[in-house]
Amino acid sequence: MYTIQMIVTFVVVLGAMIVIHEFGHFMVAKLFGVRVEVFSIGFGKRLWGHHKGDTDYRISLIPLGGYVKMAGENLDEQVTGAPDEFMSKPKWQRLCIAFAGPAMNILTALAIPAGMAMITYEMPAYENGPAVIGAVDPGSAAEQAGMQPGDLIVKIGNQENPTWTDVKDLVVLSPGHSIKVAVKRGQETRQVDLQPSSVNFDEEKVGNAGIYPVLGPNSKLVVGTVQADKPAGEAGLKPYDQILAINGQTVEQNFAGRNTLIAAIQNSGGQPVTLTVKRGAETIDIKATPQLDDGKFRIGFTPAAQDGDTIVTRLSPPKAIKYSIDTNWRFLRLTEIALAQVFVGQRSARDTLAGPIQILKFSGQAASEGAWSVLNLTGILSLNLGIFNLLPIPVLDGGLILMLFLEAILGLVGMPLTLRIKERMMQVGFVVLMLLMAFVIVNDISKVIPRSSSQQQNSQPASSPK
């Protein structure tokens, strides 16, 4: 269900990205003396505006972005040859104007993480450390590949000396696909084939290898989600309770302890289990009787190991900029991997592409998590918008850049890029763009259509109802 908060966040995020994009075109066009007739925030009917010079600065009815109208930019427009028309400017200036929109989006995507990191930078200590395995799920892809606690992952795919973030990213993007992994055990390095299982998470297929990092000495084993109508919820277990023991046996406060806890519940044979939990300053015993669910005994909660060793600091401007560049490069690399998998048939386009309905959902999730998450989402979407607009599809900025290059190359041999050819290119580009939009919208709709109960049951995270 779409709430007012979700819709408002969607409109603000999408609108801001498009206005920033159009402001890039506007700013460079003005710099080169192009007559900008309209700078509009929103589309459709003009609600309010102010004329200054040659430009009508306006607010329009539909608040989904905005647009810039430059004199003489449209192929179907009567071009007079006036010096302040877009087509009257040299090719290099038109190229700069076309590139300015995507460039503003990319700069915004760089500025947001950098600015946030200079205010506060918070990250679990293990994420950027060596990928030492702290625990392996029984029966998981990692166990089947022969990986063990204490192994150091020295290479995964093409990534040498990966961090835990590198490992997590590649595993999530490789559901059901084999990954070459090199692990160091003692003085020996072993080559293994890791094939992450495919699990459904938030309507998407993601990879799960069943491996977890080594956490610091201040880590905790806590309760994540609790199903109110299951034994754990009925017995009074609450989110954020710290789990100290099960049936009087102390459990480690890490992922190994999580696996011990899960095994004890699943091997209970349906006999009552007693969880000793810490809630604030109070220690409580909670007794629940596991029930068979999908062939396993569970009590209906998700245990989660939390790293207590979190880096909290402020980065200096140079370090913040480097962090932002690394972060955006990581998103681009992950996008490249995902799209490459689509083209070779390892991943479906349905599980890779998102349209406006999915962005609306992401906006709602970000809004519920706070302003920091909304800013993060804005940065990610701004980067994607900038890169998408650079695709060489006529009607996009990248298509205009392509035509300018073609004009320049053909001009070297005395061949013009005629208006007729440009119009045909624009028509083809428009059809391609409409087909792409139709696909992502239908794809989005298919993800929100209610599925059969068996599919919904299979979509539950593998570790949730323990």
Image: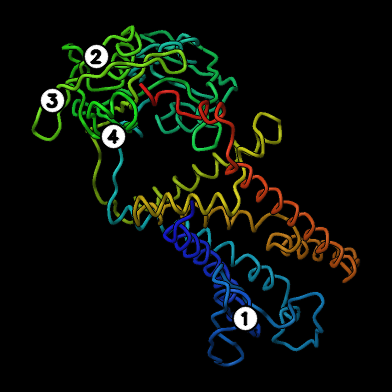
Dot 4 or dot 3: first in sequence order is 4
- Please, what is the three-letter code of the amino acid marked with disc 1? Lys
Q: Which residue is mark 4?
A: 125
Snapshot colouring: rainbow
CB of mark 4 within 8 Å of CB of mark 3?
Answer: no
Mark 2 lies on residue: 273
Mark 2 or 1 closer to N-term? 1
Amino acid type at circle 2 is Val
Residue placed under numbered mark 1 in the picture: 45
Q: Residue at x 66, y 34 (%)?
A: 348
Name the amino acid, label 4. Answer: Ala
Query: Contact (CB < 8 A) between labels 3 and 2?
Result: no
Q: Position of residue 367 (x, y in %)?
A: 39, 54
Q: Tell which tag, 4 or 3, sits nearer the viewer.
A: 3
Q: Amino acid at mark 3?
A: Ile
Q: Is residue 405 above or below residue 81?
A: above
* Dot 3 crowding, Cα within 10 Å, few <14, some 14–19, many 20+: some
Q: Earlier in the sequence, mark 3 or mark 1?
A: 1
Expressed as whole percent of the image width and height from the top left, the position of residue 263 reads 33, 12
Q: Which mark is residue 284?
A: 3
